Image (tube, coloured by chain):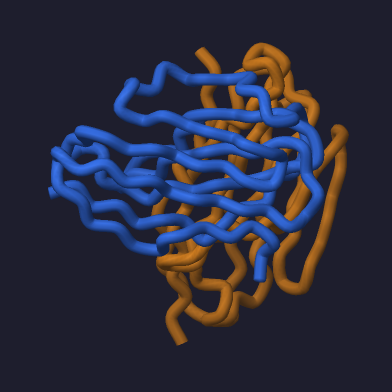
Amino acid sequence: ELKVEQNPLFLSMQEGKNYTIYCNYSTTSDRLYWYRQDPGKSLESLFVLLSNGAVKQEGRLMASLDTKARLSTLHITAAVHDLSATYFCAVDMRDSNYQLIWGAGTKLIIKP
Amino acid sequence: ETGVTQTPRHLVMGMTNKKSLKCEQHLGHNAMYWYKQSAKKPLELMFVYSLEERVENNSVPSRFSPECPNSSHLFLHLHTLQPEDSALYLCASSQEWQGVEAFFGQGTRLTVV
């Protein structure tokens, strides 16, 4: 079965703390995507990870990909309230004809 | 402005009504998608169009009928919906339909009463 699992599904944290969101997937993938969604709004593309060992950083967010472990992480450094959102990972898998398979999302609440 | 525009943003319809959702992309992309986002469920891909031809239909009930008249416009025609069809319907586009980053519209919040 083609699956993408995120954890945690819900995270409440204080400003200034660090934390990591995990995205596991079940089969071979060529690309992994991270998206952000604010309440009532569209999905915004954050990162596209294309190869094993890829690391990308934008501000307080850093994403990495380990294709051997079939794992991606989204690390938040010194969180600020504006990062409160739901974060989704999505994977395109050869077994799904390269259609995106989505994780359930991680709802992140950062308290001032 | 995301480059992908959806209308209406909110829609309330009865189970016997017929309505349509509209999506327009200004990015010059060749592929367009309809997704359904329900509470506590992963995003569900409904339809994929590439160069105005449907390339994927993920077992969506026939009460949802897509139409892609050109590469910039995508419609989702709705008729005799059920309350469980209430959800956020998201349109997206990408340069190609396989293995590339997608850009999403704001979504239409649909409530079926």
Q: Position of residue A25 (x, y in %)?
A: 60, 27
Determine the residue positioned at 26% across, 38% down: B85
The correct choice, above or below, for A110 with respect to A20 in the image is below
Residue B81 falls in image quadrant? top left
Q: Nearer the viewer, residue A19 or B67?
A: B67
Q: Quadrant of the N terminus of chain B?
A: bottom right
Residue A57 image position (x, y, % from top left): 81, 62
* A43 to B86, vertically: above or below: below
Residue in the image at 49% along x and 67% along y: A38
Letter of the blue chain: B
Q: Horizontal and vertical percent for residue B93? A: 68, 45
Q: Is residue B25 left or right of residue A104?
A: right
Q: Hey, which quadrant is residue B16 in on the image?
A: top left
* Front in this rendered view, residue A91 or B92: B92
In percent of the image, x 47 and y 52: which residue is there? A106
Q: Is residue A60 above or below residue B17?
A: below
Count of numbered badges drawn on the protein: 0
Relative horizontal placement of residue A71, taking residue A83 as reference (left or right): right
Which quarter of the picture shows residue A11?
A: bottom left
Q: Residue at x 70, y 22 (%)?
A: A98
> Would residue B76 be seen by someone viewing this image from the given angle?
yes
Coordinates of residue B111 in the picture (x, y in percent): 23, 52
User: Which residue is nearer to you in this view: A34 or B71?
Assistant: B71
Chain painted orange: A
User: Along the horizontal axis of the image, is A15 left or right of A73?
Assistant: left
Q: Nearer the viewer, residue B110 or A33?
A: B110
- For this orientation, the residue located farthest to the front is B69
- Would residue A66 be seen by someone viewing this image from the given angle? no
